[in-house]
Amino acid sequence: PRSAAGAALALGLAGSRAAVPKLLLAFRTHDAGLGAAICRALGLLADPEAVEPLLVALKAGFVATDVCRALGRIGDARAQPALTRALRHPEEKVRAEAARALGLLEAGPPPPTLKALRKGLEDKSPRVRLSAAIALFEHGDEDAGRRLLQVLAAARGKAARVASPEARAKA
């Protein structure tokens, strides 16, 4: 699987869309490492033919973070409903990538997606809040810029507290 993963990634880096059918055939794997590499390749190739198989994989929970990233790079609006549902995923990385992907989609998000992204601004994870703010900002939400600055300031403040000599002494 390791050499197959390298080959899949090389196909994506080569930029040959002729490889998409072969990558989709190989995507039927149960190997997460190979699946993640194929997602990276499909995202690099950004071929809309990959959207439906990626949506099936996302629904099944297979390499969900990588699937969200690939769907965002492809930018096809068909991914919007599934990515919106992924904002409720139990894993922080999946929620963050789903928000990020929604910001990359060509079509402006419909009201339910905007509502879900705004709810992402309240997520317990700073990573998800940041991704949601960026996605909203990418789609012209003026308030998202202010929220983005708040998230960044809070993260900077936390990093400064963790790095302070007083915080290290308490650890």
Image (tube, rainbow, N blue to C red):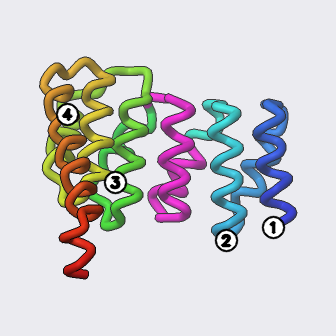
Q: Nearer the viewer, mark 2 or mark 1?
A: 1
Which element is circle 3 on?
A: helix
Relative side of 73 to 108, left or right:
right
Q: Amino acid at mark 2?
A: His
Q: Residue at 72% x, 63% y: name it.
A: 34
Which element is circle 2 on?
A: loop
Image marks 1 and 4: residues in contact by CB distance under 8 Å: no
Residue 127: within the magenta? Answer: no
Q: Which residue is mark 2?
A: 30
Q: Which residue is mark 4?
A: 149
Residue 92's image quarter? Answer: bottom left
Image marks 3 and 1: residues in contact by CB distance under 8 Å: no
What are the residue bounds of the magenta stretch?
52-77
Which element is circle 1 on?
A: helix
Q: Relative to 119, is 13 above or below?
A: above
Image marks 4 and 2: residues in contact by CB distance under 8 Å: no
Measured from the top left, where is residue 171 in percent x and y? 25, 81
- State how far apart marks 4 and 2 are (Cα): 41 Å
Q: Which residue is mark 1?
A: 2
Q: Residue at 33% x, 23% y: name it.
A: 138
Measured from the top left, where is residue 72 in percent x and y? 49, 36
- State how far apart marks 1 and 4 are (Cα): 41 Å
Label 2 vs 1, first from the N-terminus:
1
Q: Which residue is mark 3?
A: 95
Residue 18's image quarter? Answer: top right
Label 2 crowd bin: few (<14), some (14–19), many (20+), radius 10 Å:
few
* Frontmost residue, 147 versus 39: 147
Q: Amino acid at mark 1?
A: Arg
Q: Nearer the viewer, mark 1 or mark 4?
A: 4
Q: Residue at 66% x, 31% y: name it.
A: 47
